[in-house]
Each structure stands twice: as structure tokens, then as C-alpha cells.
Image (tube, helix red, strand yellow):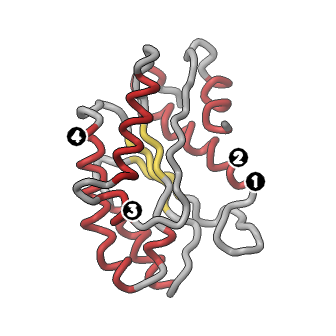
Amino acid sequence: MAFANAILKKVSNFGTIILVPCAVGGTSIREWSGQNSRLRRRIVERTNEALSYGGKIRAILWYQGEKDTETEQGRDLYPAEYRMFVRRLYEELRHPQVPFIQVALASGQGDPEWLQSVRETQLAMEDIITVDAMGLPLQPDGLHLTTMAQVSLGNMLAHAFLTSYTPYRVS
């Protein structure tokens, strides 16, 4: 909601914002990237449902990867699987010409080098806008963002969207 509220605060005539949440905690990128991924299919189905009411896709927001920092295998598979996920998602959404805005991880669950490797993949992705969550406050579990950090992240995502999406570009 912080994302939507920040947009509406800066662009009062933006219109209705429908967020299509599809988060599934504790999932690896392989679960999203596979040829017949039920998770990715769920994104497409829920998006198409929202579009059936007359809306349009204006951005894709993505925050995932902590699970892939748990093992060396997860880290090693992440780059190719992430690229495949993004390609397949755009294909299945019929190539929307919208920004893909990802969040670079703030935390991980395994070796700190595995977290850094996943972050490097995220930060190096071409044609993807990145908002870096590193340094935002974490809950005592050391993994999840605090509520205030989530609000800050929503504002950061809104800023990234508004500076990248031509009809609403603000500085």
C-alpha cells in the first residue's frame, strides 16, 4: 500500500491502482521459472483477472531470492533461472511494455557470500530497474523487513516507477 499511496500523493490524477499480490514466502526462483510453474501461472491468471475489469499493467514489482541464498546450489542456479523467469513472465503476460522493478535483497539465510552472489545477479540484470533494500531495518529474525522498512521500500519503489514510466515521470 505504501507504493500505491506514494504514487497517488505525487500524481493526483493517476487513477485507480490495483495491486495484484502473488507473494509466496520461502520459494526459490526455480519454483517461479520452470516451464509449467504453477506460481508464475498464478501471477498470469491473477493479472488477467485484474485486467478483465478494464485496467492495464503499468509495472511489475518483484522481491524474491532469500531462499536462493540458503544453499550453494540455489546461488549457482539463480542467475539463469532468474533470467528465464523474467523472460517467461513477459511472454505469458503478452510482452507488456512496462518496467520490471525488482528489489535487491536486504538479507539472506545462508552463507553471506551466497547472499552477495544473488545480489550481484540482481544488480547486474539488464532492462530491469533495481531498488536496493540493503540497509533497511530488519525484524529480530534477521530476515524480514520491519514495518517501517516496508513503508520505506514502498516509497522507494514508487519513486523508481515514477522516474521510469514516461507518462508519469517526475524528478
Q: Give me the C-alpha separation between circle 3 and circle 1.
A: 23 Å
Q: Are marks 3 and 2 in contact (CB under 8 Å)?
A: no
Q: Disc 1 marks which residue?
A: 147
Q: Which SS class for mark 2?
A: helix
Which residue is located at x 37 percent, y 77 percent?
74
Q: Give me the C-alpha separation between circle 1 and circle 4.
A: 34 Å
Q: Which SS class for mark 1?
A: helix
x and y, in percent, of residue 129 in the image = 40, 47
Q: Are marks 3 and 1 in contact (CB under 8 Å)?
A: no
Which residue is located at x 26 percent, y 58 percent?
83
Q: Which mark is residue 151?
A: 2
Q: Disc 4 marks which residue?
A: 91
Dot 3 or dot 1, earlier in sequence: 3
Q: Is residue 100 above or below residue 27?
A: above
Which residue is located at x 22 percent, y 40 percent?
91
Assess disc 1: are there few (<14), some (14-19) or many (≥20) residues with their C-alpha within 10 Å of its C-alpha.
few
Q: Give me the C-alpha separation between circle 2 and circle 1.
A: 6 Å
Q: Are marks 2 and 1 in contact (CB under 8 Å)?
A: yes
Dot 2 or dot 4, earlier in sequence: 4
Tell which tag, 3 or 1, sits nearer the viewer.
1
Drawn side of residue 30 relative to residue 103, left or right: left
Task: Quarter of the image for the N terminus: give it.
Answer: top right
Q: Give me the C-alpha separation between circle 2 and circle 4.
A: 31 Å
x and y, in percent, of residue 68 in the image = 43, 73
Q: Which SS class for mark 3?
A: helix
Q: Give me the C-alpha separation between circle 3 and circle 2.
A: 21 Å
Q: What's the amino acid at mark 1?
A: Thr
Tell which tag, 4 or 3, sits nearer the viewer.
4
Assess disc 3: are there few (<14), some (14-19) or many (≥20) residues with their C-alpha within 10 Å of its C-alpha.
many
Q: Which SS class for mark 4?
A: helix
Q: Disc 3 marks which residue?
A: 122
Q: Nearer the viewer, residue 128 or 31?
A: 31
